[in-house]
Image (cartoon, coloured by chain):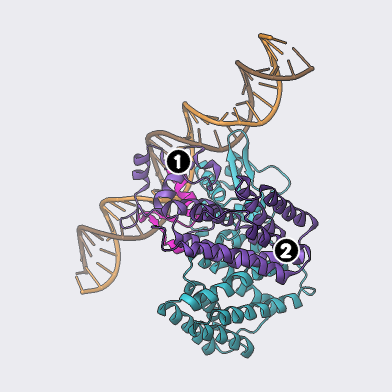
Chain colours: A cyan, B purple, C orange, D brown
DNA sequence: TGCAAATTATTATCATATAAATAGACTAAC
DNA sequence: GTTAGTCTATTTATATGATAATAATTTGCA
């Protein structure tokens, strides 16, 4: 029932965040799909909390584009198109609904758009600190060398370092999505992080950025994600849902 | 003092949303930069509203990643890296701080990553309805033909249609950013929407998507944004801030 | 000094009362 | 019969006061 570890760690901190988490999950999993959304009073009663707690949770969901409240009309579910999907909490709830291949494909389509561009930008404008962070991420991947536990974390650290090195704060917004995609991909595909081909590809990104070659950095990053995408689509028929 | 027209239209609907808007603006414009964030009681007093209103506004800002509240510790400003920059409201506040060339460049770097990818996806998988919407957007641009008022709206409609036609809901998250970037670019650069070269470029996107040619669609969209970027950087030295 | 307990400042929660907004029904005027 | 106005019921919006939980700080003690 609790949300994925991706979502903000404070989701269960208190009654309000707990209710937020439960409602967010329920909304995303379609519990309120056909029927009218319950009223403030109903929610309070159903979850055994005061109106203040309910109202604050509702307001948070409204801030994420999921609900809207008006006098006499009540609380209404906003269309899915209005949800702030890149919000880490929403992303977390989304994974409870469907850790489907579909969602994974959509994640990686977005990664395929963002990460090569970030790599190219990083090649042009990464600071020394940014380059060092990329270097560290790669070193960790090398050290983890294959199936070790740290391999995935190192992989994530590397990709986040590239996003950060782009210098564009909007690109950093995708860190949760990228982390999630990597964590989820690996679970679904049993891909071995750090296997030689993968390591080589990451090395090419690191090298191109260090060499200040945006085109090569872009291409190398695109290759990494293309590989992932290929593995995923290879599993499309297998995985049930 | 009121937020940009981009931000949710309901920002001034009631006391809570009004306070949300004012606090969001103040935070983004750096009013609380050096000093500790005021307490719940201080905010209530300063804005002449009850604690409920204050708490609900605070909770909404927390939901957008901007604030965090804990007993005894008080309300704290979260680092800018945690803000949900793609949230339409945050985006709106951001434009009040600095409608700077910097921000415009960052917007268009993101557009350059997203929109060509969306165009390529649309070429592969757009539905008939999606194609029709793109077609309508382009027709509107042609009809507006040059400096007419509808030109900008038509331009925006075209770009949003491509995002939607991609079929990936995550790409649709960028509609506010794209709309804003287009509206802002035009104000900053006096670019004439619908001038022949621009129209031609948009026609190329439409045609490539219709022809189901992802590579051409990607290239044509990239060209459009490359043009905008060029005009913007041409103004980099001119605009003061 | 170092640890434990008391203090205190602040948010979290609850309960209750009143106000405001609005959808929908009803009514009256033209 | 259609329009505009009015009423009413429902629901959220706002206000307030009391209590609980939390954690930083201070105090007291060994």
Residue A189 position within the rendered picture, expressed as x and y whole percent measured from the top left = 69, 78
Give the position of the C terminus of chain B as an image quadrant: bottom left
Look at mark 1 in the image and give the residue it sits on.
B53
Element at badge 1? helix
**Disc 1 and disc 2 on one polypeptide chain:** yes
- The x, y position of residue A145, in whole percent, is 56, 90
Label 2 secondary element: helix
Judging depth in this view, the residue of B24 and A51 nearest the camera is: B24
- Residue B195, position as x, y percentages in the image: 62, 55
Residue A117, image x and y in percent?
A: 57, 72
Q: Is residue B159 above or below residue A198?
A: above
Residues A48 and B31: in front is B31
Residue occupying image coordinates x 76% and y 61%: B126
Chain bearing tag 1 is B
Residue beneath the point at 60% across and 48% down: B147
Which residue is under mark 2? Answer: B122
Q: In the displayed structure, does residue B161 sit left or right of residue A3?
A: right
> In which quadrant of the rendered view does residue A156 lie?
bottom right
- The residues colored magenta run B53-81
Asked whether the beta carbons under mark 1 and mark 2 sit within 8 Å of each other, the answer is no
Upstream in sequence: badge 1 or badge 2: 1
Q: Is residue B60 magenta?
A: yes
């Amino acid at each position: 029932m609790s949300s994925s570890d991706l979502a903000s760690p404070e989701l269960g901190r208190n009654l309000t965040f707990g209710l937020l988490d439960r409602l967010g999950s329920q909304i995303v999993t379609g519990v309120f799909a056909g029927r009218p959304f319950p009223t403030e009073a109903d929610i309070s009663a159903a979850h055994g909390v005061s109106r203040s707690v309910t109202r604050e949770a509702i307001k948070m969901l409204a801030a994420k584009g999921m609900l809207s409240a008006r006098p006499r009309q009540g609380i209404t579910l906003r269309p899915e198109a209005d949800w702030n999907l890149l919000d880490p909490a929403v992303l977390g709830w989304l994974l409870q609904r469907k850790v489907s291949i579909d969602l994974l494909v959509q994640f990686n389509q977005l990664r395929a758009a963002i990460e090569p561009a970030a790599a190219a930008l990083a090649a042009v404008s990464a600071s020394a600190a940014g380059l060092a962070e990329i270097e560290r991420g790669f070193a960790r991947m090398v050290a983890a060398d294959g199936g070790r536990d740290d391999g995935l974390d190192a992989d994530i650290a590397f990709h986040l370092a590239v996003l950060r090195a782009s210098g564009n704060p909007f690109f950093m917004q995708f860190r949760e999505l990228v982390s999630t995609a990597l964590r989820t991909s690996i679970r679904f595909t049993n891909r071995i992080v750090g296997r030689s081909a993968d390591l080589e590809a990451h090395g090419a990104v690191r090298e191109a950025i260090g060499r200040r070659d945006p085109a090569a950095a872009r291409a190398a990053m695109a290759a990494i994600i293309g590989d992932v995408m290929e593995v995923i689509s290879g599993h499309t028929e297998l995985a049930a849902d």
